[in-house]
Structures are given as C-alpha cells and as structure tokens.
Amino acid sequence: MLKIRKEQSDELAKIAIKRFEDSMVVHIKEFFPKYFEIMGEPTIRNVIQYGIDRSEDYGFTTERDVSLYISLMIMLGSNFDVDPQLPWTGRILTDESIQNSIARIDRLYDTAMDYLDRVAGLESQYYKRALVNVRDYPFNELSQTGVSNIERKAMSQLQKIWPQKYESIDSLTVRLFISSGIETANNYNFTSERGVGLYIALMFMLGSGFNNDPQFPWAAAVLNDKSTEDQATRIDRLYNEAMALLKKCLA
C-alpha cells in the first residue's frame, strides 16, 4: 500500500501526496457534500494538508489511515486529538497496548462513531437542534464588562445549547474544558462575560482548537487582528462570522 510520508522530498512522493489530496477532495465532495459546499475547495485542501501533517505524528501514513483521520477532523474539529472535551481521543492515540496503526485508527474511528451517534443523533437531530439553540442564544444580553461565576454560567449555557453533548462529558472534564476556554479567551483579550461566553460556546460547537483550525480561517483572522484593540468590536466580528457560518449550516 502506498505511503504518503510528508518528509520525503523526491518527486515521486510529491506526486503521490498531490494525488492523495486530489482523491480526498473527491471523497469529501461525495461523502460530505454540505460541508464541501460550505467550506469550498481551497479551504478543504488546506484541511487535507493539515491532516496529513497531523496524522503522521501518530504514525498514520497509509492512505486509508490518513483518510479516516481527516474524516474525524471534519466531524470533531481539526485538533480533536488534544481537545479537552474529547479526552478519549488522546488516550487511544497514545495507548501503547495498541500495536499497529490500523488497529489504532479503527479503534479511534469506531469510538468516535459511537460518540457521535449519542451526542449528534443517528440522523444528526441533536446536532441540528444545537445549531438552532446557538443561533437563538441571547449572547447580546450577556454583560460587556467583567465576569462573575463564569464557570457556573458557562455550564448552564452549554447544557442549554447542546444537552446531549454536555451530558456525555463528566463533571471534571467539563470544568477543565471551561477553564481552558477562559484562559484561551483571555489570551485574546476576551475578558467580558459576552466574550468569554461566546468563545466557550464556539469551542463547544466547533472544537476547542477552532481558533487555529484551517476549517475556520475567519476565526484566526478575527482573533489575531491587531488593527483594533476594542474588545466589543472584535467580539461582534467573531459573533457575526460565526452566525454567517451557522446560517449556511442551517440553510
């Protein structure tokens, strides 16, 4: 079976990688048509290239292994392997008792499918309801200044947005997830209740690493924009970009 090691520099390897990328574009268009329509081919190619690099860190180098890994990125977020709300992914990826890459990716994929059946629903009905709940959530009513009891408020917010997913996470993991969200939001100077609440909600819906996920380049563009230091303005921009994506998902 052809391997696609990125570090190989010979021309044949480059051709093989490009051929794999092209085949993955076709695969995603066929099996994730709505996703393909929303993201567009340039973004999808960036995701595929990111997935090749990311998956190789765990010893996935065959086309089948990398294809499954990229599919999981689409469903769970590109940085699912280090997402604090998905601790089982890291455990499987680093489990030394799993002796080969085929067994590892199969275990990871099967576990992910069971998880998604529970939290998203067999027909994605829970996920679709969560999208509506995010759309209707009154972020604009949250305080534009400091935060108080943020952990409790964030727990309540997440439970209202996507109860099936919230209930699948144990209380300690929820706290670690929220703590991570607060810290990362603060790194972007999001310190108001509205800013932190929005940031944690996007982590919950898109994956904890949405801020540098190639699937959501708009997020990094807003969060890393140094042209304005006004927190409220940047929060508004992030909210508007997220709602634009949500509208496409619900269309």
Image (tube, helix red, strand yellow):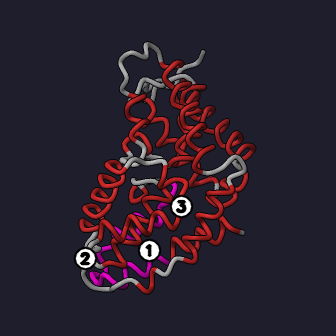
- What residue do we see at 25% from left, 76% from top? 148
- Residues at marks 2 and 1 touching, judged by CB atoms closer than 8 Å: no
Q: Nearer the viewer, residue 197 or 175?
A: 175
| Whole-number angstrom distance, CA of label 3 to CA of label 2 | 23 Å
Q: Is residue 233 magenta?
A: yes
Task: Please name which of the two marks, 3 or 1, marks the residue nearer to the observer.
Answer: 3
Q: Is residue 223 above or below residue 119?
A: below
Up/down of 16 relative to 180, above or below: above
Work out whether mark 3 precedes mark 1 in sequence or the reverse, and give the earlier one.
3
Dot 1 surroundings within 10 Å: few (below 14), some, or many (20 or more)? many
Residue 6 percent coordinates (x, y): 45, 30
**Callout 2: 10 Å neighbours few (<14), some, many (20+)?**
few
Residue 66 in picture, x, y percent from top left: 54, 30
Quarter of the image with the C terminus in it: bottom right
Quarter of the rendering occupied by the N terminus: top right
Mark 2 lies on a secondary structure that is loop
Which comes sooner in the sequence, label 3 or label 2? 2
Q: Secondary structure at mark 3?
A: loop
The image position of residue 218, as x and y in percent, is 47, 66
What's under tag 2, amino acid-wise?
Ser
**Numbered circle sitting on residue 148:** 2
Residue drawn at 60 percent across, 25 percent down: 64
Amino acid at circle 1: Leu
Which of the marked residues, 2 or 1, is nearer the chain's N terminus? 2
Three-letter code, disc 3: Trp
Q: Nearer the viewer, residue 198 or 228?
A: 198
Residue at image mark 3: 162
In the picture of the structure, the residue carrying the numbered disc 1 is 238
Which range of residues does the magenta coloring cover?
215-239
Q: Is residue 10 left or right of residue 226?
A: right
